[in-house]
Amino acid sequence: MPATEQTWRNLKILHVVFGLVAIVLLLATVLMLAADHNRPWKKYARGFRNLETWSAAARVAEQDSAAYEARREELENQLAAARRADLDAGLAKQFIAQVRTVPADAEAADRAELDVDALVRQADADERLVLRGDLLARLRDIAKRAKFREDLLAGALKLRKAELDKNRADYELAVADELPQDRQAELLALADSKRTEVASATLEFQAANTHRKELDATLVRLTAEEDAAAKAVADHRGKLAQLQKTLADRRPNAGKSVLELPVLDAFNGPLRVDQLWLPQLTLNNNFRDVARFDRCTTCHRGMDKSVPGAPTEAAYKQSQTVSLTLPTPTSAPSSTTADGDGNPSWRSSTGSSWHREACSTPMTPP
């Protein structure tokens, strides 16, 4: 049969049909991705994330105010005053006396005593700060050396106990194997000797432990006022720092936006379905009971959130409608000024300037 260029179907029509089908397939794929990307629960997730971001920003603005700065300055001044104050003379002498009980620390005790006398004689505030810091550093170094000696003695005691266990085991094996009496007596003597070493090492460790604890206790009492002031400053700063960190974690950024793009959001995106595994609340599938997976909190977000510092109070209460009725005064109010709490951002967000104008404008009764 001779070759021919004729085909069973018209190529032009096939090309058109193929192009149209390809376009339809492309549109279907895009629509499928869009439908998957815009699933209803993501709207609630984004809305709650925006609410959480707004709440964190509001708490930061509430804390970062003039009152907060005034309190911070007050606490820092108290800390600076505590660091320039005299050390308790009685506690300082007690600490030095405790240090002298260890001959190896006698020289350190003498230097610490000289530093205490120099601190008492110094009148300049800045010099007192430096001298006090150096003195406390010396005292802490003495306590660290005491801890180092305690650790060495603890290691030596552990080694002696291991040697005692070994000698006791040798003696017990000798008795079990019915070795000669002279050999048994020799091993028993070694065990008794090692037991004496263990008792001596135990006493040395206990003495070092007691000495170190006494130094630590006296040192804590020496720096109690400064430590309390430092803790107050740290707590005051820490609350705002924690709120700022929470805001930074919740706030949208370029990385989160990229991960929320279609297709990419399938790879550990910031928005995801909450799946709670409930093995005790099962579903019967005829052949067996299987654990239930609850996804309600994916949309009903905020159900487990509570007010910071009040775990029994809901953070996001159910919406309510409150109606207020303000009676018309019989006379014009006096001019007042609303300054808020000293927070400029609060005044700008609430429009306190408008409030001042409104309050200063006389009201005419109907």
Image (tube, grey):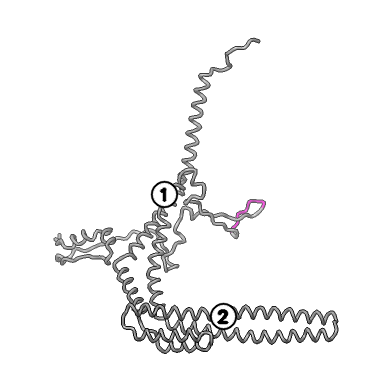
Q: Residues within 10 Å of mark 1 (few under 14, many from 20)?
A: few
Q: CA distance from mark 1 to mark 2?
A: 54 Å
Q: Is residue 114 above or below residue 316?
A: below
Q: Left or right: where does residue 166 sit relative to residue 17?
A: right
Q: Which residue is mark 1?
A: 254
Q: Earlier in the sequence, mark 1 or mark 2?
A: 2
For residue 95, say whether it is visible: no
Dot 2 lies on which element? Answer: helix
Determine the image quadrant of residue 221. bottom left
View extreme (front): residue:
107
- Residue 125 is situated, as x and y percent measured from the top left of the image, at 32, 79
Residue interval drawn in magenta:
281-287
Q: Left or right: where does residue 304 sit relative to residue 323?
A: right
Q: Nearer the viewer, residue 79 or 257?
A: 79
- The amino acid sitting under disc 1 is Ala
- Residue 222 is situated, as x and y percent measured from the top left of the image, at 43, 83
Is residue 24 part of the magenta span, yes or no? no
Residue at left offset 68%, top offset 85%? 197
Of badges 1 and 2, the one in the foreground is: 2
Dot 1 lies on which element? Answer: helix
Determine the image quadrant of residue 167. bottom right
Q: Which residue is mark 2?
A: 149
